[in-house]
Image (tube, rainbow, N blue to C red):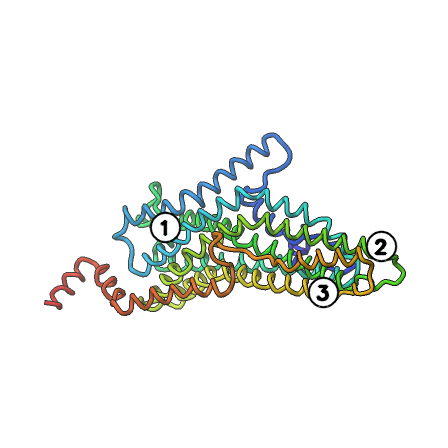
Amino acid sequence: MSKQLFERLAVAPLDQRVTSLDACAYFYRFATCLGWIPPVEKGWLRWTYALWTITTMLMGVVYLPLGLSLTYVVHFDRFTPMEFLTSLQVDLNCVGNVIKTCVTYSQMWRMRRMNELIAPLDDRCRTPSQREILHKVVARVNRVIIFFMCTYFSFSILTLFTSIAVGKAPWQLYNPFVDWMIGTWQLWVASIVEFFMVWTGESQELLADTFPIVFISLFRAHLAILKDRIENLRKDEELSEEEHYEELVACIQDHRTIIECSNIIRPMLSYTIFAQFMLVGIVLGLAGFNILFFPNTIWTILSNIAFIMAICTETFPCCLLCEFLIEDCSKLSDAVFHSNWLTATKRYKSAVIYFLHRTQQVIEFKAGSIFPISVQSNIAVAKFAFTIITIVNQMNLGEKFKRNREMPGDLDRVLMEDN
């Protein structure tokens, strides 16, 4: 059982058949757990699964951000400054999660369409080097998804046990049925409910953040395989000129398929990354503010660091892959130009010229159709976090915030000292 569960994390032997769909194995497993992939069979099982889908969407998209916001209105006096900032940074990130989850869930058909289009390209992997490229990317992508899972869930787990250790609910999510301040039993019930809500939101965000990595990695792998095929064009002396021409046409068709897949994923990637770019600087600024200006235990610091790592992994890997994809397109164009076409027929040369023109148009993605998805853009929006921390430091807002959040008795003492 455990071998089947983790079979895609290791690079499969070259004699074993591996497909591009295998790279989506863990992604689709998470989607199935969240209720995003309904069973094919009709009947009571499908209705039960639909009920589970509605439940997870209500918890992650509706109740989680709404419950955090209602807590600030109903029970704001219960928060310490550190607890308030911890809750606020999660609440703001939930705003982006709502947008990303709705876009990803409603556009799941695009992913299935891409799997259908890429499937024929797997049969083009004929040499051991080409199969090795596909086998490695399948294992790498599945490992990345597991890494994302560990990074995201470590924040909620650390926050859960750190808060319970001091006798408080982790995020103090508004709960009209259970008051965690009444007793230990109520604290555990409320904390577990909150953890399950946040876990649902994290799982939804995990899917929204990993689908670009999954499919862009597949694009890069098939571009690398295509580059290897182009470099070997007209090198087999046993083939006729007509067969060489057919191989070139097959390369052109496969490149067109990759371009079509990139156009399918482009709207999803544009909306989700744009939503995250708009919030990443603010959320990172609040997390840094929490660490620098308030007393923290080693566990609360680890919890905030885990949150910062989770926020960074939401955008940085995708931005890095988009830059690598542009570089791969440039290498593919060079491979076409340097291929063995000088002594080919006129028809073959015409096809090479057409192919060279097509490969010079790189695959580029933009966030919100405004600015390119790149490492430079990611760094630019992340710098806003330092702007927030600088403003807070210069205006001494941290000290003022702590003084305003003192208990009434302590506040009177502070006022007397000021007088």
**The one of 372 and 114 positioned closer to us in this rendering:** 372
- Count the numbered circles shown: 3
Distance CA(mark 3)–CA(mark 1): 67 Å
For disc 2, the neighbor class at 10 Å (few under 14, some 14 to 19, many from 20) is few
Image coords of residue 219 (percent x, y):
64, 56
For disc 3, the neighbor class at 10 Å (few under 14, some 14 to 19, many from 20) is some
Is the C-beta separation of discs 3 and 1 under 8 Å? no
Horizontal side, residue 22 vs residue 410: left or right = right
Task: Tell me the residue at 60%/52% (across/down).
Answer: 262
Label 2 SS: helix
Task: Tell me the residue at 80%/55% (across/down).
Answer: 347
Tell me the amino acid under the disc marked 3: Phe
Name the front one of labels 2 and 3.
3
Image coords of residue 254 (percent x, y):
71, 52
Point out the residue furthest to the right here. Answer: 238
Tell me the amino acid under the disc marked 2: Glu
Distance CA(mark 2)–CA(mark 3): 20 Å
Is the C-beta separation of discs 2 and 1 under 8 Å? no
**The one of 221 and 15 positioned closer to us in this rendering:** 221
- State the quadrant of the C terminus: bottom left
Name the front one of labels 3 and 1.
3
* Residue of label 3: 337
The answer to whether any part of residue 288 appears in the image is yes
**Could you tell which of marks 2 and 3 lies nearer the N-terminus?**
2
Is the C-beta separation of discs 2 and 3 under 8 Å? no
**The one of 277 and 95 positioned closer to us in this rendering:** 277
For disc 1, the neighbor class at 10 Å (few under 14, some 14 to 19, many from 20) is many
* Residue of label 1: 187
Q: Which mark is residue 243?
A: 2
